[in-house]
Image (cartoon, coloured by chain):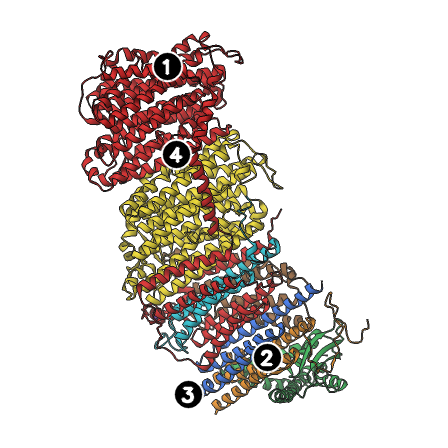
Chain colours: A green, B orange, C red, D yellow, E blue, F cyan, G brown
C-alpha cells in the first residue's frame, strides 16, 4: 500500500509541477516526475518502506535492458532478413517459469515476444512452463538461461 | 534541427517497418514470420509516433502518442501469441530446418489444455 | 327513386340482422315491399307518359358522378317488371324457401338484388348505372351460390361472376370513354350529344365495349353458358334474375343506347348476327334438354337473342316489338319457372323423363303451366301472340331480303320455342304417372298463386292488349325515339303473310312437340356435339392460360435468388445503355484532376488485389482477410483525401464487420466453387458492364461543375453558429442531425433484429 | 399551431418504440403502449391533416437551418394523408397483434421494431431531403428485416433471405443515384433539387440518375421485373407482420416514386415510357401470379404486386386525373392490403391452414364474419361503390386521355384477375365446407381464444372495413383530397416556394 | 517545406514498398495464419502512414485514427485466432 | 487520380455484383460489403477530392477558408457506412441461421416451394 | 479462449480504452471523433474484454444487458432533438449553455445528442456481437 501511495504522491507532485510551471508539455511532466522522485527519496530516508525508491531504478534497468536486447536482436534479424542466406536455427523451447503472478507471466511473455527472434507461444495450464519459439537456438540450455537471467530475473525483482 | 531529428526517427521507424515486411516476405515458416513482423512493425510505428510527438511538441499529443505506443506494446505480442498458438494448433508446419519442438504432444486437443514441460503423460 | 333504392338496400341490410325466428315471422310480409314499390311506380305512370321523371343528387361531383335518376318509358317498363315479378317471387319464396337454413339471408340478397336492379334501370348517370350493374352481378353471384354446399353451385357462381364481371369491366371502360367524349356521365346529356359521340374516333371501340358488357350480361353467344349453369340457384332466383330481370340488363343497356348508336359502326349488323345466332342456338338446344330448368334457361337465351336482334333491326316497329316481347317473355317465362319450381318442390325432381301425369293432382298448377306455355308459344289470344306478331311484322315490313332471311330464322327458332314451352309447361302434367314417382307432397298456396296469376294476367293482357300497349309499350318507344307512334296491337289480324307465319309457327311447333320424345339420348348427343362449345373452349382456354401464366410466372419467379438479382441488373443495364445510346455518345472522359502519388497507387493496387482475392479464393477466411485489406485501403484513401473521420469510422466498421463475419464463419457453409462456365461468363458480363457504366457515368458527373453553396455555408457557419470546428461532426450532430438520429436507430434495430434472430427460434 | 409540430407523429412513434424497449420483458405494457401510442399518433395525424388541409403546406427546417443547408421536414396534403392512413393501418395492426401474438414472440422485440418501422414509414412521408429519405428507407428495411424473420422457421428465413438481399441491392442503387444527384447539383434538398436539376446542362446524366433511382426504389416497391422478393417472402411471416408489410411497405416506395418523379426527376418521354411499360407489365405479371396460386397469402402477395401496377400506372400516365387515381388507389390499397392479410390471419386461426385445399366452412360456422371479410375482399376487387372502384375510373380515364391504351388494357386484366381470384378465394374459403386439417402443434383454434383475443382478431378487421367503406361511400370527400394532391404534385411551385422561402 | 517533401517522397514510398511486400505474403499465404499476420502488419504499416500523414498535414488528430486502427487490428487478430481455434476443435470432434 | 478512382469504383461495383451473383452464401456477404464500399467511394469521389485539407476549422480560426474538402459527402458516407454495417450484420446472421437451421448450403438449394403444391 | 496472457492484458487494456472512448466522444465536435466512433471504441474494448473472459458468458462480467443502453441512448438523443420544440424551434435546433469548456467546447444539445449516439452504438454493437458470440462461440 505504501508503495502505491508513494507512486501516487509522485504523480501528484508532477502534476502540481506542471500546473505551477504552466507549461503542459510531456517533457515538463517527466521532468517534474524525476524532480519529485528525488525529493521524495531524499525526504523519506526514515520511512520503513523503501521499496518504491528501489523499484524505479529497477524498472529503468529493465527498460534499458529491454531496449538493449531489442536493438541487438533487431540487428541480428535485420541481417538475416536482408541477406540471401539464413543463419538461423529455430526451435520451440520450453522455458520453466519461476515467476508466478499472472501479470508477471504476461509481461515476461510479451517482453520475449517483443524482442525480435523470439515469440512466446503459450503458457502451460499450471503456469510452470512458457513455450517460446526462437530463431537462434544453437544451444537450448543456453537459451533458457539467457531468458531466465535476463528478463525473468529483472522482472522477478520488480514484481515481488 | 528538430526537423532533422524527426526525419531521422521517421527514417529508422520506416526502415523497421520495411525490415519487418521484408522478413514477412522472406522468412521460411509462419513462426519466423511472426517473430519478425510483430516487433519490426511495432518498433517502426512506435518510432514514427515518437517523431510525430516531437513534431507537434504538445502535451496532449505526446500523451496520446505514448498511449498508442503503450497500447501497441501490449497488443502486438498478445496478438502474436494468440496467432502463434493457434497456428501451432492448426498444425502449421515448422521450418524443416528447425532444431526442436518442445511443444510436441503437450496440447490436449480435446480441450486445449496445455501441460507443462515436466509433466509426464 | 333514390329513396326506393335506399329503402331496398336498407331493408336488405336490416333483414340480414334478423335472427331466424323473428325473421320468419316478419318476412312473411316481405312481398309488401315490391308490391308497394309497384304501386308507387304505377302511380307515376301518367307522368311517364307525359315525359320523364327526374331526380338529381350530387355524389362525387368532381368526377361528374351523381345519383341522378330518370323514370322514362324504358325504365318504367323495367321497374314494373322488377316490382311486379318481384312481388310474386317474394310471395312464392316465403313458402318455397321456408325450411332453408339461410332463409333470412335469402331475402336479404333478394332485396339487395331488387334494389340494384331498380337502380340500374333508373340511373341516369353512367357510373351510377355501372355501380348498380356490378351490384346485380354480385348479388347474382351470392344467389347462384346460395346453396353453397353444392360444389357445382359454387362453380357456377364463380363462372357467372367472372363472365358478367369481366364484361362489366369492359363496359366501364366504354362508359369512361363516353364520359370523356361527352364531358359528362349523365345519360341525358350523352343522348343529347349523340353527334359528338358519332363523330368520335372512339366510337367503334365504345360500341364494342358496350357489346362486351351487354352480351356477357345478357348471355349472348359465346358468353351464354353461365346462364344454364346459374340454374343451380333456387328456383325463385332463376325466375327473378335469370329470366325476368337481370339478364335483360344487357338488353336494357343497348336499348338505351340505340338512339345514339343506331346506324353507327356495324352496330346493327353485329347485333343482328349475334342476336340471331343466340336465338337459334338457344331455341334448338332447349328442346333437347331433359331438366325443366335447363329447357327454360335455353329458351331464355333464345329470347335474349331475339331481343338483341330486335335492337339490331332498330326500326320503330322493331323497338315496339322489343318492348312488347320483353313483357311477354317476362310473364310467361316467370310463369314457367314458378311452375317448375312448384313441381320441383312437390315432386322432388325436375327431370322431364321422371315426370308425367301430374294433371291429376295439380289441376290449377297445370292451368298455370298451360297458360304460360300458351303465351310462350304465342297462341292466340295470349300476350305472346302479340309479341310474336309484332316481331314478324317488324321484320317483314322492311322488305329487305336480308331481313327476310332473318325472318326465316326467327320463324325456325320460334317453332322450337313453341315446342320447348310446351315441354316445360305442359308435358309434366300429361301422359302417365311415372311408376317410380314418390308420393306427392302437398302444394302450398304460396307456390300456386303466383304462376297462376302470371298465366291469367298474360291471358287478360292478351285479350285486352290496348291497356298495356298504351301505358307501357308506347312510352318505351317514345322514350327511345322521342316520337310517339300509333298503337299496333290487334287481337285479330287479317290473313296476311305475318299472321300465316304466326299460325305456321304454332302448328309446326306443336307437331314437333307431339312427335318429339325427349330422351337422354338426344341430350347426350348434343353434349357430344358441344365438345367444341364455347364453354369447353373457355375451359380449355382457362387451362391454357393457367398453364401459360404458370409457365411465365415460374419462368421469372424461378426461386433462384441470384437469378433475380441478375434479371434486375440486366434490366437496369438495358435501361441505362439504351438511354446512353440514344442520349449521348459513350466517351471515355479523362478528367483533368489531381495527379497520383506512389503511395496512393500502392494503396489502390492493394485494394484491387484484395478484391481479386475475394473473387478467386476458395477459402472463406481468406476472403474475409482480403476484406480486411480492402477496408484498410479504403481507410487510407479517405485519409489521403482529407477525410479523417471517414477513415476512422470506415476502418472501424469494416473491421468490425470482419470480426462479426469471423465469429459467424464457423457456422457458415464453405465456399462453393462449382462454376458453370457459361453462367460464369454471363455473370462476368453483367457485373463488368455494370461496373463500366458506373465508371463512365462517374467520370461524366465529375466533369460537371456543381454548386458548392452548401459546403460553403457549412464552412462559414460551423463554428460561428453551430459552435463546432470539426465540420463533419457538426453536420452529423447539427446540420443533418436528423440523419444521424435515424442512423443510430437503424443500428439499434439491427441489434434488436440480430438479437431476436438468434434468441427466438420458434421451430415448434 | 406552429409548423415545427409537424414532426410530432414521428416523435410519437419514436417514443413508443423507446418505451417498449424499456419494458423489454413486460409484454403487456408493450401491447398497451402500442395501442395507446398509435391512437395518439392517429389523432395527431388527423389534426395535422386538417390543419394542412385548411392552411396549406407545413414546413419545418430541422436544426433551424435555412432550406438547402439543413434537413427540411415538409407536410403537404399528400404526406399528411399518408400519415393518417398509416395511423389507421398501424392502429389496426397494433390491436391485431396485441391479440394474436404470443408472449414469446412479443418478448423478443416485436413491438419496438414494429414502432421503429412505423417511425421509418412516417419519417419517409415528411422527409424533404433526398438523403434523409434514404435514411428513413433504410430504417424501414432494417425494421422489416427484423419483423420478417421474427421467430423464423425455415421457410420464413428462406423468404427473408431473398427479401433482404434484393433490398440491400436496392439500397445500393438508391445510394448510387443520390451520389450522382449530389455530384450533379451539390444539393440534396428536394425543393432545391427541383430548382437545380433543370439547370443541369447534361440532362442525360439526370435521367440516368433517375433510372437508377427508379430501379432502386422499384425493387422496394416491387414492380416488374424487380418484384421477385415479394411473392417469395410475404407469405412467410405471421399475418400481423404480413399485414403491415402488405399494407405499407411497398406503398412507401410508391409514395417516394410519386414524390420524386413529380418534383425533380420529371419523366421525359423515355422514362415516361419506361414507367408506363413497367406499370403495365407489373399489372400483368402480378395478375398472372395471383391467378395460379392456391394459397391465401400467396394470392394476396401476388395481388400486392399486381396492384402496385395501378399506382405506377398513374405515375406513368402523369396527368392530374391519373395521379389523383394513383393517390386514391394508394390510400385504398394500404387499408385494404393491411386488412386482407389480417383476414388471412383470421382464416388461419379458424382453419389452421392457408392453402385453398384446407380452408373452408366460414360461411357455415361464422356467417357474420364471412360478411365482414366480404367488405375488404370486395373492396379489393373494386366492386363499386367500394373503395377500389373510384381510383380505377380515374386511372382508366387518365389512361384514355393520355393515349396509354396498353395501360388501360393492363388495368382491365389486373382487375379481372383480381375479380376471379378473389371470387375463387371466396368460394373456397367461405362457401366450401370445412376441411379436416391436422393442426400444427400448439395450434390454438379461434374458438379456444379468450373473448378479448377474439375481439382483437375481429375488431381491427372491422375497423379497417369501416374505413374502406368510408373511402367507398365517401368518395366525393376522398376524391376532393386526391384531386388537390394531384394538383399539387403536378404544380409543385407552392411546395418549392414554401421550403425555399428563407433564401 | 523540406521535411514534408522528405516525408512524402522518401518515407511514404518506403512504407508503400513495405506494404506491397506484405501484400505479396497476404496473397501468397500459404497458411491462414500467414495471411492474418500479413493483414496485421499491413495495418501496422497503415498506422505508420497515418502518423506520417499527420505530420505532413499538420493534423495531430490523425493520431486518433492510428489509435483506432491499432485497437481494431487487435480485435481482428483475436477474432481470427478464435475462429481458427474453433475450427480446430470442430475438426477434432 | 479521379479517373483511377472512378475505375476503382466501377471495379468495386463489378466485383460486388459478381460475388452477389454466386451461389455461395458467404460470397453474398462479401459482395455486399464490397458493393457498399463502392458506393461510399462513389459519393466521396463525386463530392470532389481534395488532398491534405480536412474540413476542420483551425485552432485559432472561426471559419474555414481557402481549399478544403467538401464535408457533406463525408457526413453522408459516415451515415451510409453505419447503416450498411447494421444491415450487413443482420444479413450475416440471417445467412448463418439459414445454414444452421435450414441446412441451406447454397442459394440453389433455396427455392420457393411453389412446385410442392 | 481465455489464455492467461490475453486475459491479463485485457484486464489492463479495458479501462484504458473506455477512457479513450469517452475522450473521443467528448471532443468530437472540435476534432475528428464523436459519439459514433467513441461508442465503437467502447464496444470494441468490451468485446476484447469479453474474448478474454469467455465471451459466451457476458452476464458474468457485465452488470446489465448491453441492450438496455439502446433505449437509454435513444432517449437522450431524442430528448436532444425534441427539446427545441418546447422553445418553439424546429427539432434538432442547437441549444447552448453559455461558456466554453476544455476538450468539449460549448455544452449544448449537440453534446447530449452525441452522448445518446454513444450509448446507442455501444448498446447495439454489443448486442449484436454478444448475441452472436453466445451462440457461436463455445469455450
Ligand atoms: Na461533379
Ligand atoms: Na461536384
Q: Residues within 10 Å of mark 2 (few under 14, many from 20)?
A: some
Separation (CA) of disc 4 from disc 1:
37 Å
Does the CB distance between marks 4 and 1 fall below 8 Å? no
Closer to us: mark 2 or mark 1?
1
Which residue is at the far right?
Answer: B120
Q: Which mark is residue C163?
A: 4
Q: How many marks?
A: 4
Separation (CA) of disc 4 from disc 3:
88 Å
Q: Are marks 3 and 1 on the same chain?
A: no
Task: Give the answer, above or below, for where D75 lies relative to C538.
Answer: below
Q: Which residue is mark 1?
A: C511
Front residue of C345 and C333: C333
Q: Earlier in the sequence, mark 4 or mark 1?
A: 4
Q: Which residue is mark 2?
A: A11
Does the CB distance between marks 4 and 3 fall below 8 Å? no
Does the CB distance between marks 4 and 2 fall below 8 Å? no
Chain of residue at mark 4: C
Does the CB distance between marks 2 and 1 fall below 8 Å? no
Amino acid at each position: 500500500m505504501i508503495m502505491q501511495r508513494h507512486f501516487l504522491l509522485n504523480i501528484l507532485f508532477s502534476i502540481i509541477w506542471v500546473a505551477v510551471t504552466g507549461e503542459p508539455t510531456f517533457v515538463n511532466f517527466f521532468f517534474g516526475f524525476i524532480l519529485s522522485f528525488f525529493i521524495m527519496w531524499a525526504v523519506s530516508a526514515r520511512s520503513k518502506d523503501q521499496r518504491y525508491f528501489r523499484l524505479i531504478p529497477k524498472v529503468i534497468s529493465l527498460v534499458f535492458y529491454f531496449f538493449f536486447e531489442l536493438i541487438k536482436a533487431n540487428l541480428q534479424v535485420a541481417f538475416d532478413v536482408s541477406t540471401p542466406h539464413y543463419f538461423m536455427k529455430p526451435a520451440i523451447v520450453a522455458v520453466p517459469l519461476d515467476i508466478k503472478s499472472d501479470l508477471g507471466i504476461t509481461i515476461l511473455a510479451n517482453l520475449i515476444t517483443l524482442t525480435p527472434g523470439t515469440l512466446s507461444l503459450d503458457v502451460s495450464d499450471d503456469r510452470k512452463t512458457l513455450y517460446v519459439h526462437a530463431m537462434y537456438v544453437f544451444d537450448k540450455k543456453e537459451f533458457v538461461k539467457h531468458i531466465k537471467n535476463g528478463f525473468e530475473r529483472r522482472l522477478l525483482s520488480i514484481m515481488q | 534541427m528538430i526537423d532533422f531529428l524527426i526525419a531521422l526517427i521517421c527514417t529508422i521507424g520506416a526502415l523497421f517497418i520495411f525490415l519487418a515486411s521484408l522478413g514477412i516476405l522472406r522468412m521460411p515458416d509462419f513462426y519466423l514470420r511472426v517473430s519478425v513482423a510483430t516487433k519490426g512493425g511495432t518498433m517502426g510505428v512506435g518510432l514514427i509516433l515518437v517523431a510525430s510527438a516531437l513534431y507537434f511538441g504538445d502535451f496532449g499529443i505526446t500523451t496520446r502518442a505514448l498511449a498508442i505506443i503503450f497500447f501497441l506494446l501490449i497488443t502486438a505480442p498478445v496478438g502474436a501469441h494468440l496467432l502463434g498458438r493457434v497456428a501451432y494448433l492448426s498444425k502449421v508446419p515448422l521450418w524443416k530446418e528447425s532444431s526442436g519442438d518442445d511443444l510436441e504432444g503437450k496440447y490436449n486437443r480435446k480441450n486445449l489444455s496445455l501441460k507443462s514441460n515436466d509433466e509426464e503423460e | 327513386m333514390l329513396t326506393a333504392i335506399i329503402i331496398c338496400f336498407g331493408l336488405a341490410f336490416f333483414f340480414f340482422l334478423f335472427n331466424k325466428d323473428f325473421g320468419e315471422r316478419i318476412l312473411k310480409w316481405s312481398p309488401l315491399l315490391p308490391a308497394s314499390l309497384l304501386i308507387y311506380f304505377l302511380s307515376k305512370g301518367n307522368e311517364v307518359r307525359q315525359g320523364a321523371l327526374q331526380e338529381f343528387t350530387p355524389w362525387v361531383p368532381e368526377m361528374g358522378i351523381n345519383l341522378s335518376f330518370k323514370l322514362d318509358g324504358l325504365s318504367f317498363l323495367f321497374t314494373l317488371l322488377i316490382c311486379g315479378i318481384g312481388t310474386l317471387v317474394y310471395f312464392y319464396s316465403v313458402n318455397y324457401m321456408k325450411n332453408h337454413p339461410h332463409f333470412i339471408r335469402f331475402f336479404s340478397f333478394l332485396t339487395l338484388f331488387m334494389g340494384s336492379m331498380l337502380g340500374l334501370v333508373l340511373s341516369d348517370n353512367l357510373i351510377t348505372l355501372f355501380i348498380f350493374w356490378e351490384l346485380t352481378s354480385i348479388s347474382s353471384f351470392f344467389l347462384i351460390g346460395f346453396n353453397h354446399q353444392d360444389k357445382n353451385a359454387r362453380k357456377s357462381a364463380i363462372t357467372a361472376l367472372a363472365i358478367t364481371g369481366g364484361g362489366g369491366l369492359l363496359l366501364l371502360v366504354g362508359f369512361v370513354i363516353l364520359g370523356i367524349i361527352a364531358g359528362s356521365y349523365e345519360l341525358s346529356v350523352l343522348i343529347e350529344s349523340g353527334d359528338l359521340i358519332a363523330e368520335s374516333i372512339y366510337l367503334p371501340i365504345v360500341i364494342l365495349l358496350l357489346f362486351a358488357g351487354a352480351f356477357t350480361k345478357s348471355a349472348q353467344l359465346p358468353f351464354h353458358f353461365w346462364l344454364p349453369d346459374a340454374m343451380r340457384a333456387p328456383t325463385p332466383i332463376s325466375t327473378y334474375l335469370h329470366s325476368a330481370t337481370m339478364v335483360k340488363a344487357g338488353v336494357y343497356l343497348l336499348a338505351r343506347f340505340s338512339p345514339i348508336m343506331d346506324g353507327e359502326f356495324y352496330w346493327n349488323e353485329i347485333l343482328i348476327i349475334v342476336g340471331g345466332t343466340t336465338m337459334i342456338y338457344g331455341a334448338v338446344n332447349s328442346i333437347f334438354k331433359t331438366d325443366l330448368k335447363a329447357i327454360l334457361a335455353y329458351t331464355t337465351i333464345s329470347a335474349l337473342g331475339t331481343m338483341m336482334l330486335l335492337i339490331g333491326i332498330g326500326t320503330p316497329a322493331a323497338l315496339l316489338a322489343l318492348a312488347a316481347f320483353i313483357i311477354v317473355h317476362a310473364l310467361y317465362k316467370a310463369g314457367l319457372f314458378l311452375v317448375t319450381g312448384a313441381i320441383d318442390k312437390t315432386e322432388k325432381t325436375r327431370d322431364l323423363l321422371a315426370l308425367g301425369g301430374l294433371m291429376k293432382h295439380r289441376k290449377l298448377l297445370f292451368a298455370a303451366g298451360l297458360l304460360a306455355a300458351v303465351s310462350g308459344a304465342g297462341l292466340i289470344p295470349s300476350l305472346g301472340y302479340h309479341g310474336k306478331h309484332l316481331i314478324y311484322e317488324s321484320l317483314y315490313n322492311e322488305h329487305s331480303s336480308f331481313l327476310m332471311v332473318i325472318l326465316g330464322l326467327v320463324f325456325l327458332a320460334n317453332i322450337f320455342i313453341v315446342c320447348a314451352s310446351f315441354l316445360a309447361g305442359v308435358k309434366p302434367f300429361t301422359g302417365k304417372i311415372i311408376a317410380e314417382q314418390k308420393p306427392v307432397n302437398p302444394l302450398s298456396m304460396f307456390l300456386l298463386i303466383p304462376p297462376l296469376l302470371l298465366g291469367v294476367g298474360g291471358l287478360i293482357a292478351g285479350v285486352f292488349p290496348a291497356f298495356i300497349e298504351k301505358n307501357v309499350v308506347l312510352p318505351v318507344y317514345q322514350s327511345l325515339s322521342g316520337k310517339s307512334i300509333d298503337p299496333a296491337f290487334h287481337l285479330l289480324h287479317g290473313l296476311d303473310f305475318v299472321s300465316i307465319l304466326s299460325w305456321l309457327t304454332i302448328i309446326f311447333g306443336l307437331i314437333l312437340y307431339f312427335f318429339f320424345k325427349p330422351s337422354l339420348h338426344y341430350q347426350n348427343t348434343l353434349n357430344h356435339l358441344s365438345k367444341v362449345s364455347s364453354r369447353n373452349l373457355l375451359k380449355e382456354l382457362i387451362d391454357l392460360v393457367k398453364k401459360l401464366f404458370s409457365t411465365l410466372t415460374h419462368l421469372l419467379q424461378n426461386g433462384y435468388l441470384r437469378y433475380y438479382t441478375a434479371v434486375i441488373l440486366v434490366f437496369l443495364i438495358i435501361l441505362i445503355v439504351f438511354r446512353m445510346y440514344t442520349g449521348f455518345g459513350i466517351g471515355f472522359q479523362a478528367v483533368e484532376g489531381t495527379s497520383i502519388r506512389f503511395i496512393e497507387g500502392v494503396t489502390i493496387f492493394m485494394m484491387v488485389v484484395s478484391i481479386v482475392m475475394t473473387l478467386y479464393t476458395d477459402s472463406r477466411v481468406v476472403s474475409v482477410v482480403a476484406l480486411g485489406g480492402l477496408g484498410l485501403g479504403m481507410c487510407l484513401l479517405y485519409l489521403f483525401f482529407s477525410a479523417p473521420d471517414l477513415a476512422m469510422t470506415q476502418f472501424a466498421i469494416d473491421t468490425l464487420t470482419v470480426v462479426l463475419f469471423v465469429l459467424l464463419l464457423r457456422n457458415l457453409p464453405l465456399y462453393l466453387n462449382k462454376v458453370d462456365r457459361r453462367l460464369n461468363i454471363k455473370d462476368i458480363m453483367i457485373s463488368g458492364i455494370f461496373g463500366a457504366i458506373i465508371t463512365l457515368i462517374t467520370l461524366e458527373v465529375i466533369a460537371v461543375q456543381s454548386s458548392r453553396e452548401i459546403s460553403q455555408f457549412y464552412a462559414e457557419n460551423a463554428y460561428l453558429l453551430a459552435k463546432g470546428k470539426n465540420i463533419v461532426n457538426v453536420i452529423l450532430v447539427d446540420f443533418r442531425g436528423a440523419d444521424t438520429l435515424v442512423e443510430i436507430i437503424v443500428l439499434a434495430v439491427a441489434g434488436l433484429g440480430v438479437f431476436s434472430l438468434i434468441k427466438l427460434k420458434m421451430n415448434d | 399551431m406552429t409548423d415545427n409540430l409537424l414532426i410530432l407523429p414521428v416523435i410519437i412513434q419514436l417514443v413508443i418504440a423507446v418505451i417498449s424497449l424499456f419494458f423489454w420483458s413486460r409484454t403487456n405494457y408493450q401491447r398497451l403502449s402500442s395501442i395507446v401510442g398509435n391512437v395518439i399518433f392517429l389523432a395527431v395525424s388527423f389534426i395535422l391533416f386538417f390543419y394542412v388541409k385548411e392552411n396549406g403546406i407545413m414546413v419545418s427546417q430541422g436544426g433551424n437551418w435555412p432550406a438547402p443547408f439543413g434537413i427540411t421536414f415538409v407536410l403537404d396534403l399528400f404526406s399528411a394523408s399518408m400519415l393518417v392512413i398509416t395511423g389507421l393501418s398501424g392502429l389496426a395492426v397494433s390491436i391485431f397483434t396485441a391479440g394474436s401474438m404470443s408472449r414469446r414472440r412479443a418478448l423478443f422485440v416485436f413491438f419496438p421494431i414494429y414502432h421503429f418501422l412505423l417511425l421509418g414509414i412516417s419519417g419517409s412521408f415528411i422527409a424533404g431531403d433526398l438523403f434523409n429519405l434514404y435514411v428513413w428507407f433504410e430504417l424501414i428495411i432494417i425494421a422489416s428485416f427484423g419483423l420478417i424473420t421474427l421467430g423464423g422457421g425455415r421457410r420464413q428465413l428462406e423468404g427473408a433471405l431473398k427479401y433482404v438481399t434484393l433490398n440491400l441491392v436496392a439500397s445500393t442503387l438508391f445510394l448510387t443515384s443520390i451520389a450522382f444527384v449530389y455530384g450533379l447539383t451539390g444539393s440534396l434538398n428536394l425543393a432545391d433539387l427541383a430548382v437545380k436539376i433543370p439547370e443541369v446542362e447534361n440532362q442525360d446524366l439526370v435521367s440516368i440518375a433517375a433510372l437508377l433511382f427508379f430501379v432502386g426504389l422499384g425493387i422496394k416497391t416491387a414492380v416488374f421485373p424487380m418484384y421477385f422478393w415479394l411473392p417469395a417472402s410475404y407469405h412467410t411471416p405471421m399475418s400481423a407482420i404480413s399485414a403491415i408489410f402488405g399494407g405499407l411497405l411497398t406503398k412507401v416506395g410508391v409514395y417516394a416514386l410519386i414524390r420524386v418523379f413529380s418534383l425533380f426527376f420529371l419523366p421525359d418521354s423515355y422514362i415516361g415510357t419506361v414507367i408506363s411499360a413497367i406499370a403495365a407489365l407489373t399489372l400483368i405479371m402480378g395478375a398472372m401470379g395471383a391467378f395460379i396460386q392456391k394459397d391465401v397469402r400467396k394470392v394476396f402477395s401476388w395481388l400486392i404486386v399486381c396492384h402496385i401496377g395501378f399506382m405506377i400506372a398513374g405515375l406513368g400516365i402523369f396527368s392530374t386525373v391519373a395521379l389523383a387515381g394513383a393517390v386514391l388507389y394508394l390510400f385504398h390499397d394500404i387499408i385494404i392490403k393491411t386488412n386482407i392479410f389480417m383476414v388471412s390471419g383470421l382464416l388461419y386461426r379458424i382453419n389452421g391452414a392457408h392453402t385453398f385445399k384446407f380452408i373452408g366452412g366460414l360461411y357455415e360456422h361464422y356467417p357474420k364474419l364471412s360478411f365482414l371479410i366480404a367488405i375488404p375482399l370486395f373492396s379489393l376487387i373494386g366492386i363499386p361503390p367500394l373503395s377500389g372502384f373510384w381510383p380505377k375510373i380515374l386511372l382508366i380515364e387518365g389512361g384514355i386521355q393520355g393515349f396509354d391504351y396498353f395501360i388501360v388494357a393492363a388495368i382491365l386484366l389486373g382487375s379481372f384477375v383480381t375479380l376471379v381470384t378473389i371470387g375463387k378465394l371466396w368460394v373456397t374459403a367461405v362457401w366450401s365446407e370445412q376441411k379436416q386439417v391436422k393442426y400444427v402443434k400448439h395450434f390454438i383454434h379461434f374458438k379456444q381464444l379468450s373473448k378479448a383475443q377474439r375481439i382483437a382478431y375481429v375488431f381491427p378487421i372491422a375497423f379497417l372495413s369501416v374505413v374502406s367503406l368510408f373511402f367507398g361511400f365517401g368518395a366525393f370527400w376522398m376524391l376532393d383530397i386526391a384531386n388537390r394532391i394531384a394538383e399539387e404534385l403536378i404544380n409543385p411551385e407552392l411546395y418549392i416556394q414554401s421550403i425555399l422561402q428563407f433564401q | 517545406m523540406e521535411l514534408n517533401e522528405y516525408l512524402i517522397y522518401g518515407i511514404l514510398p518506403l512504407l508503400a514498398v513495405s506494404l506491397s511486400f506484405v501484400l505479396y505474403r497476404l496473397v501468397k499465404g500459404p497458411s491462414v495464419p500467414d495471411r492474418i499476420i500479413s493483414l496485421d502488419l499491413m495495418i501496422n504499416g497503415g498506422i505508420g502512414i497515418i502518423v506520417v500523414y499527420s505530420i505532413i498535414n499538420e493534423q495531430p488528430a490523425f493520431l486518433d485514427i492510428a489509435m483506432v486502427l491499432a485497437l481494431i487490428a487487435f480485435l481482428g487478430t483475436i477474432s481470427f485466432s478464435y475462429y481458427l481455434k474453433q475450427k480446430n476443435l470442430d475438426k477434432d470432434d | 487520380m479521379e479517373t483511377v478512382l472512378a475505375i476503382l469504383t466501377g471495379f468495386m461495383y463489378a466485383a460486388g455484383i459478381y460475388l452477389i451473383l454466386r451461389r455461395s452464401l458467404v460470397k453474398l456477404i462479401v459482395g455486399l460489403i464490397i458493393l457498399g464500399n463502392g458506393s461510399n467511394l462513389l459519393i466521396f469521389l463525386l463530392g470532389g477530392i481534395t488532398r491534405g485539407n480536412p474540413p476542420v476549422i483551425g485552432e485559432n480560426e472561426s471559419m474555414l477558408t481557402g481549399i478544403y474538402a467538401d464535408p457533406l459527402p463525408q457526413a453522408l458516407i459516415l451515415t451510409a457506412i453505419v447503416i450498411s454495417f447494421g444491415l450487413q450484420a443482420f444479413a450475416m446472421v440471417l445467412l448463418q441461421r439459414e445454414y444452421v437451421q435450414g441446412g441451406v448450403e447454397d442459394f440453389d438449394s433455396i427455392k420457393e416451394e411453389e412446385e410442392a403444391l | 479462449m481465455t489464455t492467461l496472457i490475453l486475459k491479463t492484458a485485457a484486464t489492463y487494456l479495458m479501462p484504458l480504452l473506455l477512457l479513450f472512448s469517452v475522450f473521443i466522444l467528448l471532443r468530437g465536435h472540435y476534432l475528428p471523433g464523436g459519439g459514433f466512433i467513441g461508442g465503437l471504441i467502447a464496444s470494441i474494448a468490451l468485446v476484447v474484454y469479453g474474448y478474454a473472459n469467455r465471451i459466451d458468458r457476458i452476464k458474468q462480467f457485465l452488470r446489465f444487458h448491453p441492450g438496455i443502453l439502446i433505449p437509454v441512448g435513444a432517449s437522450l438523443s431524442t430528448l436532444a432533438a425534441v427539446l427545441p420544440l418546447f422553445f418553439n424551434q424546429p427539432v434538432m435546433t442547437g441549444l447552448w449553455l453559455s461558456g466554453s469548456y476544455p476538450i468539449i467546447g460549448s455544452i449544448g444539445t449537440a453534446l447530449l445528442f452525441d452522448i445518446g449516439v454513444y450509448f446507442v452504438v455501444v448498446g447495439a454493437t454489443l448486442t449484436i456481437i454478444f448475441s452472436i458470440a453466445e451462440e457461436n462461440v463455445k469455450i
